[in-house]
Amino acid sequence: MSTTSDRFVKILDFRHFERFFTFSKSDRKTYKKAISDGVNVSVVLDMECGNTSK
């Protein structure tokens, strides 16, 4: 058994502005088209700390 723990470190968090179409499924098994103005972007580093000699 190892004694490592997971920790996520957020490096960047921003909104990228770009207009694009999204399609979502509606209740009637049809697709609804919508225009989106951007996406949220997060750059995250997964760090592990512990004994790495084994």
Image (cartoon, rainbow, N blue to C red):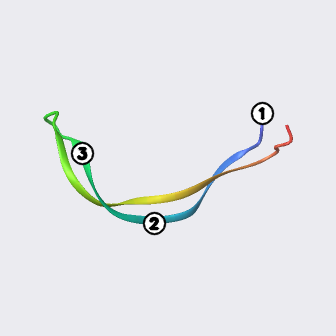
- Please provide percent x and percent y for residue 50: 78, 47
Q: Residue at x 57, y 56 (%)?
A: 44
Q: Which numbered circle lies on residue 23?
A: 3
User: 6 or 30: nearer the eye?
Assistant: 30
- Please provide percent x and percent y for residue 19: 29, 61
Determine whether the residue tagged by mark 2 lies in a helix, strand or loop: strand
Front tag of 1 and 2: 2
Which of marks 2 and 1 precedes in the sequence? 1
Determine whether the residue tagged by mark 1 lies in a helix, strand or loop: loop
Vertical comparison of 34 with 14: above or below: above
Label 2 close to label 3 by CB (< 8 Å)? no
Which of marks 3 and 2 precedes in the sequence? 2
- Please provide percent x and percent y for residue 35: 23, 56
Label 1 close to label 2 by CB (< 8 Å)? no
Which of marks 1 and 3 precedes in the sequence? 1
Q: Is residue 41 left or right of residue 4?
A: left
- Are there few (<14), some (14-19), or many (20+) residues within 10 Å of tag 1? few
Pick the quarter of the image with the N terminus.
Answer: top right
The residue carrying mark 1 is: 1
Q: Residue at x 41, y 60 (%)?
A: 40
Give the image quarter of residue 2.
top right
Q: Amino acid at mark 1?
A: Met
Determine whether the residue tagged by mark 3 lies in a helix, strand or loop: strand
Q: Amino acid at mark 3?
A: Phe
Mark 1–mark 2 distance (CA, rounded to whole Å): 38 Å
User: 27 or 19: nearer the eye?
Assistant: 19
- Please provide percent x and percent y for residue 12: 54, 64
Q: Which numbered circle lies on residue 14?
A: 2
Vertical comparison of 37 with 48: above or below: below
Q: Residue at x 15, y 36 (%)?
A: 30
- Are there few (<14), some (14-19), or many (20+) residues within 10 Å of tag 2? few
Label 3 close to label 1 by CB (< 8 Å)? no
